[in-house]
Each structure stands twice: as structure tokens, then as C-alpha cells.
Amino acid sequence: MRQKILVSLTTTNLATTRPTWKDKIKEIDKLGLKEIAFFPTCVNIEQRKEIYKLLEATGLEKIPVTHVRHDFKAWEFDYLIKKFKTEAFNIHANRANKEFIIAAKNHLKKIYIENNAELLGIMPDLLDKLAGICLDVSHWEDYGVLQKIDSYKRFPKLIKKYKVGWCHISAISLEQIFDKENNNWIYSNHYLHNLSELDYLKKYKKYLPKICAIELENTLEEQLEVKKYIEKLLGN
């Protein structure tokens, strides 16, 4: 299968020296982009409203996939589907999403569960209600292969049982980095320093679905270089 690799508007700005989501939005027309993925992972509803207005002022035509969060409103799903032709969403696997699922009741079969660290005892219940799995490849490499978290022993069976609707691609660092947000050590990194941090993807090629979104804080221009590298790496 040939994968479509999308650059992304991400909002995980943990360091002030990195480009903000406002910086990335300014790049959209500069680079002539008509299609991107959207990761409003770290912005609240008021910030999202601002983002929607700014995106409408660009030449952007399509956002095929969006990483939603627990406080998404019902109208946001309808808006993204109608305005930007969004085909699929994903949400983290955690217990904070009960109200979210109620709000998203009309679009449950467009929402995929991401394989983040909170897998044990949560993910199977949600998978039966929603569309399937949104594969975060770096999480599988980090938690399942490098850190060998027990719950990930079941993941190869889950990924065979449930549909993989789309996926996230991030970097894998050579050494662990400290994740201040979750207070733990990880290899998965949302900022890429060297293209070789993507080489791990080769062993997951057979699991990658049709749509793959780059989940990096790097500028969109840098992500275009990442896109070229991934396409070459996968033989696309």
C-alpha cells in the first residue's frame, strides 16, 4: 500500500524557542499547501476558535485527519467535516473521554483510539465503541519495543483485530528524554533533530495505513523535508 504522508499543524509547543501554531499557519500560504493534518492537542476551545478563523483566511482546502481532545464540542466535528472535509479523527485512550464520547455520538465511527501509554484495561472497551486504532508508530516503538511496557504485549493482537484508520509519525530519540507533562522518561519525541530519528519506521511499513500524519513541532517547511525522507524510506 502506498501511504499518503501529511505535514501537520501541531500545537505541542513545550519550548518557547520552537515555532508556534500561529507561525505554522502563516506558512500554509507561503508554501502553497492545500492539505494538512491537524493536531490541536494542547489548545483549549477559545484557542481552537481562533485557529479556525485563521485557517479560513488561508488557501487551505482539506484537513483529512484531526487529533481531537477530551473537551471537543459536537459542533467542531460538524465544522471540520463540512469546512475541511475531515474524514477521520483520533483521541487518546484514557478515562477522561466519557463526556467527549457523548458529544461525539454522531461521529463515533470516524474516531480512532490512539495507542498511547494508557493501554491496559482501557483501550479494548473504547475500541468496541469507536472505529478502531489510530496507530502512533513512535509509541509502539517506545513503549512496546524499547521500554517493554507489559500492556504492549497485547498490542500486536489488537492491531490485527481492529481496523487501523490512520497513523501518527514522530521521531525516536537515541537516548531517553524527560517528558515534563507526564513526568516520565520516553524515546518518542515530537521535535525532530535528525532525519535518522525516523529510520525505525522501516520495520513498521506493513502496519502503516493509507493516511499517515507527521506529528512534529518542526516548521511546516521542515516537515516537507521529513515527508520526502519518509516517502523515500518507505519506497513510496
Image (cartoon, rainbow, N blue to C red):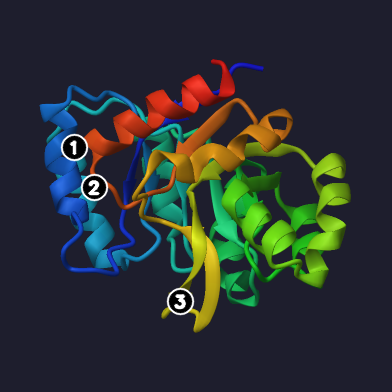
Amino acid beneath label 3: Phe
Mark 3 / mark 2, whichever is N-terminal: 2
Look at the image and tell me in which quarter the C terminus lies: top right
Q: Is residue 63 above or below residue 169?
A: above
Q: Which residue is drawn at 45% across and 58% down?
A: 189
Q: Distance between the residues labelled 3 and 2?
A: 32 Å
Q: In the image, what residue type sits under mark 1? A: Glu
Q: Which of 177 and 13 is in front in this view?
A: 177
* For residue 54, side relative to residue 214 (left or right): left
Comparing 195 with 34, the one in front is 195
User: Is 214 situated above or below 99?
Assistant: above
The residue to which callout 3 is attached is: 178
Mark linked to residue 52: 2
Q: Where is residue 26 in the image (x, y as percent from the top left)?
A: 11, 40
**Residue lying at 87% horizontally and 43% vertically, measured from the top left:** 161
| Residue at numbered disc 1 | 56
Q: Residue furthest bottom?
A: 183
Q: 73 or 65, which is in the foreground?
A: 65
Residues at discs 2 and 1 in contact (Cβ within 8 Å): yes
Compare residues 50 and 94 and report the one nearer the observer: 94
Q: Please report contact status of discs 1 and 3: CB closer than 8 Å, yes or no.
A: no
Q: Label 2 neighbourhood size at 10 Å, few (<14), some (14-19), many (20+)?
A: some
Q: Where is residue 90 in the image (x, y as percent from the top left)?
A: 56, 50
